[in-house]
Image (cartoon, grey):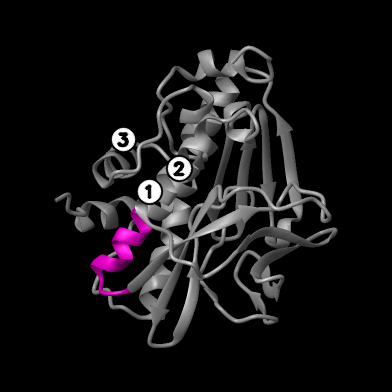
């Protein structure tokens, strides 16, 4: 059976123990994780398989200077939280970020976590790459929860929890979910669809995000965006050279993708990936 290499993970994110199964420890891990391990959808774009076994996830996100997307990120984070004694349940989310409000719900193409702590039940999610959370949220409907980099709200309707983030234009729904536990095969199916379907954004564009204290960094193809709290854009740059693109990957996101940066830069923004 694969074992989590907790010491290697903690070194990767820059956290030292002792760690306990309590909110303070989970919040510290959550914040450090999204700062050190960026959301990164390079493999689906490059038509490379996305593997969810713990060996593969650790090799990629911990050892290989890579990021990953929700299924990889939250698979790793779930193992970490369980290793420090937390009770964790994997859940499936239906993404709404880009969906018109009256459109039907789509498939479960997002993974999130329910964590039961002495302080209560919390939602932990280090892998929603449109609006990364910087800390766990209390699983409580109707409560506006202000974090260092955002304001979030859970509501209940039609048998679902709906998570929304405050943005400059008002509240924006991130995803809908229930508390029905998901098993590994559920996530494998969602991962296969999300990483291969032309209906998902990851097969047609590069999406990256890193959440540092005081700044949210996003890369969408060749566009580099910095946001403040609640999604307020503070700068936006269209990267006009492979050198500038490589510099952002290295210096801001701290990743080395599996193809040369210049080669990938030339493919971005074109129809033939």
CB atoms of marks 2 and 1 within 8 Å: yes
Residue at (63% x, 26% y) in the render: 204
**144 lies above or below 93:** below
Find disc 2 in the rendering and name its residue: 189
Give the left or right position of residue 54, taking residue 102 as reference.
left
- Neighbor class of circle 2 (other Cα within 10 Å; few <14, some 14-19, many 20+) is few
- Asked where in the image residue 181 lies, by quadrant, the reply is bottom left
Residue at (53% x, 26% y) in the render: 45
Give the left or right position of residue 112, taking residue 215 as reference.
left
Q: Which mark is residue 80?
A: none
Disc 3 is placed on an element classified as loop
CB atoms of marks 2 and 3 within 8 Å: no
Q: Position of residue 54 (x, y in %)?
A: 27, 47
The reply to whether residue 247 is in sight is yes
Residue at (62% x, 54% y) in the render: 94
Asked whether residue 59 is drawn in magenta, I would say no
Find disc 3 in the rendering and name its residue: 64
Disc 2 is placed on an element classified as helix
Q: Distance between the Cα atoms at labels 1 and 3?
A: 26 Å
Q: Position of residue 58 (x, y in %)?
A: 28, 44
Tag 3 or tag 1, which sits nearer the N-term? 3
Asked whether residue 83 is drawn in magenta, I would say yes
- Asked where in the image residue 197 lies, by quadrant, the reply is top right
Q: Which residues are magenta?
A: 76-86
Q: Position of residue 166 (x, y in %)?
A: 75, 65
Find disc 1 in the rendering and name its residue: 185
């Amino acid at each position: 059976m694969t074992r989590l290499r907790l010491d290697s993970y903690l070194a990767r994110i820059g956290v030292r123990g002792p760690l306990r199964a309590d909110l303070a420890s989970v919040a510290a891990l959550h914040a450090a994780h999204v700062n050190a391990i960026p959301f990164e959808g390079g493999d689906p774009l490059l038509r490379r398989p996305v593997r969810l076994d713990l060996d593969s996830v650790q090799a990629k996100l911990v050892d290989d200077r890579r990021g990953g997307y929700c299924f990889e990120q939250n698979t790793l984070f779930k193992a970490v939280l369980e290793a420090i004694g937390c009770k964790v349940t994997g859940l499936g989310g239906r993404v709404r970020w880009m969906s018109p409000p009256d459109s039907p719900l789509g498939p479960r193409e997002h993974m999130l976590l329910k964590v039961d702590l002495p302080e209560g039940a919390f939602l932990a999610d280090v892998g929603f790459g449109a609006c990364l959370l910087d800390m766990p949220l209390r699983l409580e409907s109707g409560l506006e929860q202000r974090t260092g980099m955002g304001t979030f709200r859970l509501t209940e309707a039609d048998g679902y929890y709906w998570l929304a983030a405050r943005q400059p234009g008002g509240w924006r729904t991130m995803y809908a979910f229930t508390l029905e536990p998901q098993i590994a095969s559920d996530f494998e199916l969602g991962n296969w669809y999300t990483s291969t379907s032309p209906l998902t954004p990851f097969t047609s564009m590069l999406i990256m995000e890193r959440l540092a204290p005081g700044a949210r960094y996003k890369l969408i193809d060749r566009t580099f965006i910095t946001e403040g709290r609640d999604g307020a854009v503070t700068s936006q740059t269209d990267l006009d050279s492979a050198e500038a693109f490589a510099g952002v990957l290295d210096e801001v996101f701290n990743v080395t993708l599996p193809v040369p940066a210049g080669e990938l830069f030339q493919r971005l923004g074109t129809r033939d990936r």
